[in-house]
Each structure stands twice: as C-alpha cells, then as structure tokens.
Amino acid sequence: MKPISKLASALIGFLISAIFFIVIAKEAFTFDTSILIATLAPTLIALLTVYGNWSRRLFVLIGIFITLADLLINPDWQNTLLSGLNTAAFIASFFAALTTLKFSAASSPAMRKCGAFLSAQPPGRRYLALTFGGQLFGLLLNYGAIQLLGSISTSRVSPELSKEVRDHRIRRMLLAIQRGFISILPWSPFSFAILISTTLIPGASWKEAAIPGLISGLILVFTGWALDQIFKPKITSPRTLRPQNTGKWSILLPLFFLLLLLSALLVGLHLLTGIRILVLVMLTVPVISLLWVAVQTRHKNTRKHVVRRTKTYLFSELSKLRNEMLLLMMAGYIGVTSSPLLQSTLNHLGIDLTSFPTWLLLVGIVWLIPLAGQLGMNPILIAALIAPALPDATALGVTPTSIVVAMTAGWILSGVSSPFTATTLLTGSFANVSAFHVGVRWNGFYTILCGSILSVWVVLFNWL
C-alpha cells in the first residue's frame, strides 16, 4: 500500500466532507446533485484506489469491468451509472458520519471503565455480560467494540493462572464479545448489513426490518449462551485468582444515556420530518460526537479541543479508513450497476427465479453468504451481487423485508465463521490463534446450529 502524504490525506478528508453535505442536500432537501456526485464520487474513488491496498483495488477493477459492460449492453447506462455513484456516495457519507462516534469514544474514560466492569463479572454471568457489552459498545464503536473489549478482557486474565485456565477463559470471553457484536448487525441502524441490504433491495427500510432483525440477533445471543453453559470446559488444574468485580451496574448509565439520546433524536426527527432513519443517523451522529468531545474537555479549553479534534478527524483520521471506505463504496456501486447485466444474463440463460419455491430462495440466501465467506468473499460483495440478481420482491411473492431478513441472517453467519472477516481476524489476534481457528473450530458448530435456526425463522417470518 502506497504511503499517503499529508496533502493527499487532507484532500481525501475534503472530498468526503463535500460528498457528505451534497448527499444530505439530496436526501433531506431533495436537491438535484447529479452533476456534483458524478464528479466528486469518481474523484474520491480514484484517490482512494491510489493509496489503497491491492485487495481493495480488485473491487475497483470489477467496477470498471461492469461499467464497460453497461456502456456496451445497457441502453439506460447513464441512469444506471449515476444511480451507482449515488449509492456509493451515500454509503461513504454514512460511514464517515458513523466513525465520528468511534473517534469521540476512543478518548472517553467511561468506555474503558465499562469494559473493565463487564469483563470482571463472575463466570456465571460473564458470557452474557460481555455479549451485552459487545452489543452496547458495537452500537457506538462498530468493529472498535471488539478491539476495546478484547484488549481489556485479555489484559485482566492473570498470568498467574495456569495456561489451561487462561486459554479457556480468553476463548469464552472473546467469543461472547464477538457474538454479541455480530448480533446487532441485522437490526442496528448503525450497521452496514442493514445499510447495504436496505439500499440494494428496492422498497426495503430499516423501520420494517428492525424487529425481525432483532429476533435474528436474539437467536445468536441465546444460542451462544446456551452452548457456553452446556459445553463448559472441564478444568483439570486449580481454579484460582478470579477477577475481582469492582463497581456497580450503574457504571453503564452514561452509555445508556448516550444511546437513549441518539434513539430519541432519531425517532423524534423521523416523526417530525419523515426523513428516513439512515439519513437522520448521518445528521445526528456527528453532532452527538462533537458534544461528547466537548463534555470530555469541559474542564479545559473546550472550543480549542473541539476544533483541533475536528481537524484531526477530517484531515488525518478519515484517510486511515481509506481501505474500508473504498470497499464499501465499490460494493454499493457494483451492486447497482451489475443489476441490469445480471438480469439480462439470467433471461438469456432462461433462468426464472420466480419459478423457484420462495422458501428455497430465502434459505439459499441465508447459506450462500457464509459459504462464499469461506472462500474469501466479503459479505458486502456477496450481498451486492445477490441483490441485483433477485427479481422484484412482489414477483417472488415476498416482501422486501423478508429478503433483508434473509440477507442479514446470512451476513451474521459469515461474520462469525469466515476466516476473512474483520471480526474473526480481530478475535484471533487477541487469542493468538488464526482467524481460521476462530471461524471454523471455535464457531463451526455454532454457525451450523444458528444457521439452521435462522433458516426456520426466515421462512416462518415470510409465512407470517
């Protein structure tokens, strides 16, 4: 990956900021921003490609190939390409807004205190406490939840314990954190699984998918807890030096307050304006993040610190996320621009997906994403390729929400089992084992069991 200069870093931050405000103008105020998006989005993608790694550049090559195919085959190629760029710009803006919260939380002493409290719970409730922590921190920090809780939890395992006890304790704590984080993906308005699936499936919305997605998440949580309790490791060495639990559950109140404030703002603004929730997330999260920084620096020169942290985020921190940004933008672009091509190919081959049983299509989506994940395919890319190949939901005899529930169910299965996803890579790094070990050996049976239950749930939800 090419080292990035300060000028390039600042330019990336400027382009992302400009695209963010243009997207807000389009989504919230219905301004026609086509020319601006068509100019700035490709410029940002080109700059991110120059300074991105080769695995992300592969997505750009796929995007170029699909663009050329659209030019040659698709008579409506102009609208298709513009729609793809609009989707890429929206995803980039959403990602940038979301990471402001992670940036603000990184300097919060309350976050570390909460993590230490949860990891110090006695064995009987430690799994559920850390699962809950993975959810709570995941809502605020995204993948940073695994980094923060993982580092705190592993650091609290005493080196005086036997290796057997240390290994089992670290494994159980890390799995609780990972599975807790994964369980929010099918319902959280801050989740990329929800963002991308509702963006790519026409007629889908977070409002409709949240409750069934929450049930999908609960299936993961309680299946994981049940397996942890049923298959407790048999320890042959003495159990000593359990972590001392200091503090009370009230230590979590500041984070609860932050989440309640976010929820109240999102719901209230949605009811007042009718603007969709995902757009409101983009509007409110940066404001909350700035307020959080102001609270943290209230005994110092608040204005100076807020301005400095804002400049650091825009012109330094955003460029550090260039690989993730490029992946997300290209996944959205590929999904939209490949839609007419895939549909044309299926028609040419005489494949009519509407002739397949509905339950088979939904269950197929659930399992295709994690299976492709074993081959190194990111769930973002798989979702971007699946969605365009599907006929309109009404033609399949289902609702758009049923497809989103199936897609996010497959997404979370891939998140716990694929050796190539960020969650398994991070979990393995804290346990000093490979991502394959985490995804297949630790989570293999869990994935199969959850996948079976989720398949039943997806079919049941569609029937209901």
Image (cartoon, rainbow, N blue to C red):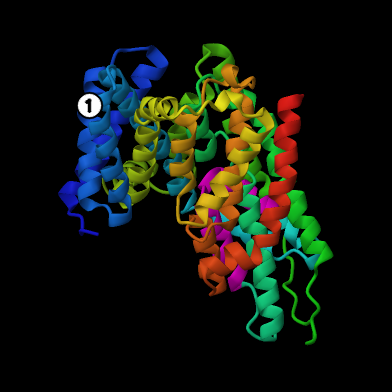
Please identify the quarter of the rendering in which residue 283 is found.
Answer: top left
- Horizontal relation, residue 182 to residue 202: left or right: right
Residue 117 position, x and y percent, is: 68, 60
Please identify the quarter of the rendering in which residue 215 is found.
Answer: top right
Q: Nearer the viewer, residue 171 or 12?
A: 171
How many C-alpha atoms fall within 10 Å of the one at disc 1: few (<14), some, or many (≥20)?
Answer: few
Quadrant where the N terminus lies?
Answer: bottom left
User: Circle 1 — which element?
Assistant: helix
Q: Residue at x 67, y 45 (%)?
A: 253
Question: What range is drawn magenta here?
Answer: 131-155
| Residue type pointed to by label 1 | Leu
Residue 297 in view in this figure: no
- Horizontal relation, residue 337 to residue 273: left or right: left
**Does residue 142 belong to the magenta stretch?**
yes
**Does residue 352 belong to the magenta stretch?**
no
Please identify the quarter of the rendering in which residue 158 is found.
Answer: bottom right
Residue 210 position, x and y percent, is: 64, 30
| In the rendered image, the vertical position of residue 262 relative to residue 371, given as above or below | above
Q: Residue at x 70, y 35 (%)?
A: 458
Quadrant where the C terminus lies?
Answer: top right
Q: Nearer the viewer, residue 415 or 430?
A: 415
Residue 368 position, x and y percent, is: 56, 45
Residue 196 position, x and y percent, is: 48, 34
- Horizontal relation, residue 168 to residue 383: left or right: right
User: Magenta residues: mostly which secondary structure?
Assistant: helix
The residue labelled by disc 1 is: 72
| In the rendered image, the vertical position of residue 319 relative to residue 261, given as above or below | below
Q: Residue at x 51, y 61 (%)?
A: 419
- Horizontal relation, residue 5 to residue 184: left or right: left
